[in-house]
């Protein structure tokens, strides 16, 4: 993704209009180079410790993206059996995949463990069942809820006291009791604070809580600090300073390891950080309505393709790639779904005309994976641009895809 020249927005030199002409509209386009750059930045920031990246693939499960991750040494964090299967299809060994469930049926955990994945146990009943089922024959991690509130929106805060995720750190005695009763092999402690966390402070705070808790578990190999790094949503946006965060956490982690008496692995599970900025949703303007109250730009997409703005008010920068030098006007950019699906309100864009191609940025994470067939609409195609070449990595859906599971046609 390049914004070097304001007038010429391209994805590795390829113009959005060319992509839409070749692959149709709307279209998800991912820039492989951006993914490589982000992963390298994270690897560099933590080069002083034994760090592993586990891509939170609920943010993007396209197999081409997963294969790219594997190629650059990034492993996987999955939240469902389906994601586990996708990981295996992308060529991962099961033991490179961590299953981080949230209150799932225990048979899903059983299948994942038997397949060879490592599980983050997220409740006391699951821990008890894990002990009964596997005793000390299978290792696991425990997902701790550190009771720290941080994140960009209530729906993406996952570590505060009221959050449904993990086992409260206040229940440590009960955790230890169950672990002892079944001699469960706890090889790691995990936590995930939430999403869109800019500052180092919340990460350091939860790290300290995990380090403190870790003293009660003698067999640890891993401390997993989850994901949630904030990315840039618009030019000049404040983001997680990875170098600073890396320095600070590295120092504390090293101190912790020396106190603990062993070199542990430090894991992170970024989703957004790795893929958000790599993605564009390209859409075409269907109608421009100059209403007395507002100018509306309708596009050939909606909450069925990109629900983040409607679900948690997320900001997606929008470029009018067809008329970049047009006179700026305020618009409400809206979808074609029969429900109010506003992508952006009162957004200043270069004059938008029917047929103009708009690019919604930051569409690489929680874009396609959250899409649906609402209004019996088809999901868009996905394209990966890598090494200057655009490749179709998922075809556009058709009516047959929608009817595939219906009976009695
Ligand atoms: C969603 C999720 C992540 C990734 O969060 P991002 O904000 O995309 O980095 C990491 N870990 C777990 C357990 C998750 O559920």
Image (cartoon, helix red, strand yellow):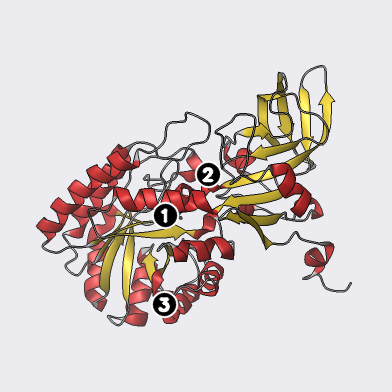
Query: Is 92 in front, or is 207?
Result: 92
Q: Nearer the viewer, mark 2 or mark 1?
A: 2
Q: Quadrant of the N terminus?
A: top right
Residue 165, labelled with which disc? 1
Query: Is 55 in front, or is 41?
Result: 41
Ligand 1 lies under 8 Å from the Cβ of mark 3:
no
In terms of secondary structure, where does tag 2 sit? Answer: helix
Q: CA distance from mark 2 to mark 1?
A: 27 Å
Q: Residues within 10 Å of mark 3 (few under 14, many from 20)?
A: many
Q: Position of residue 135 (x, y in %)?
A: 30, 81
Residue 277, labelled with which disc? 2
In terms of secondary structure, where does tag 1 sit? Answer: loop
Ligand 1 lies under 8 Å from the Cβ of mark 1:
yes
Q: Is residue 183 visible?
A: yes
Q: CA distance from mark 3 to mark 1?
A: 20 Å
What residue is rendered at 49% in x and 52% in y? 35
Quarter assignment of residue 285? top right
Q: Residues within 10 Å of mark 1 (few under 14, many from 20)?
A: many
Q: CA distance from mark 2 to mark 3?
A: 33 Å
Mark 3 lies on residue: 113
Earlier along the polypeptide chain: callout 2 or callout 1? Answer: 1
Left or right, 135 with respect to 57, comes to left
Q: Is residue 302 visible?
A: no
Q: Position of residue 316 (x, y in %)?
A: 59, 36
In terms of secondary structure, where does tag 3 sit? Answer: helix
Q: Nearer the viewer, mark 2 or mark 3?
A: 2
* Rendered view: 36 above or below 406: above
């Amino acid at each position: 993704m390049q914004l070097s020249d304001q007038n010429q927005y391209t994805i590795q030199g390829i113009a959005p209009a060319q992509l839409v002409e070749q692959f149709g509209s709307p279209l998800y386009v991912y820039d492989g180079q951006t993914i490589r750059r982000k992963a390298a930045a994270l690897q560099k920031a933590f080069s002083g410790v034994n760090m592993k990246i586990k891509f939170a693939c609920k943010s993007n499960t396209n197999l081409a993206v997963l294969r790219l991750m594997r190629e650059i040494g990034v492993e996987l964090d999955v939240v469902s059996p389906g994601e586990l299967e996708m990981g295996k299809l992308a060529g991962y060994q099961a033991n490179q995949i961590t299953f981080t469930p949230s209150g799932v049926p225990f048979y899903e955990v059983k299948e994942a463990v038997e397949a060879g994945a490592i599980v983050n146990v997220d409740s006391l009943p699951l821990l008890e069942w894990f002990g009964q089922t596997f005793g000390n024959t299978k290792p696991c991690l425990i997902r701790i809820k550190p009771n720290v509130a941080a994140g960009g929106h209530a729906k993406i805060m996952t570590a505060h006291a009221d959050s449904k995720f993990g086992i409260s750190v206040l229940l440590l005695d009960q955790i230890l009791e169950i672990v002892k009763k079944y001699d469960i092999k706890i090889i790691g402690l995990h936590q995930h604070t939430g999403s869109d966390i800019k500052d180092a402070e919340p990460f350091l705070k939860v790290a300290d809580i995990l380090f403190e808790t870790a003293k009660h578990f003698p067999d640890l190999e891993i401390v997993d600090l989850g994901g949630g790094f904030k990315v840039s949503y618009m030019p000049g946006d404040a983001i997680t300073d990875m170098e600073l965060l890396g320095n600070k956490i590295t120092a504390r982690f090293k101190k912790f390891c020396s106190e603990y008496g062993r070199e542990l692995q430090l894991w992170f599970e970024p989703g957004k950080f790795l893929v958000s900025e790599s993605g564009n949703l390209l859409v075409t303007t269907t109608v421009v309505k100059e209403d007395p109250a507002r100018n509306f730009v309708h596009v050939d997409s909606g909450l069925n393709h990109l629900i983040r703005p409607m679900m948690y008010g997320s900001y997606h920068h929008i470029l009018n790639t067809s008329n970049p030098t047009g006179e700026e006007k305020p618009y409400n950019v809206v979808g074609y779904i029969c429900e109010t699906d506003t992508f952006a309100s009162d957004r200043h864009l270069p004059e938008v005309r029917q047929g103009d191609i708009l690019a919604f940025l930051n569409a690489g994470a929680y874009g396609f994976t959250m899409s649906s067939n609402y209004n019996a609409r088809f999901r868009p195609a996905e394209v990966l641009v890598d090494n200057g070449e655009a490749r179709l990595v998922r075809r556009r859906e058709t009516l047959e895809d929608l009817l595939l599971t219906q009976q009695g046609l």
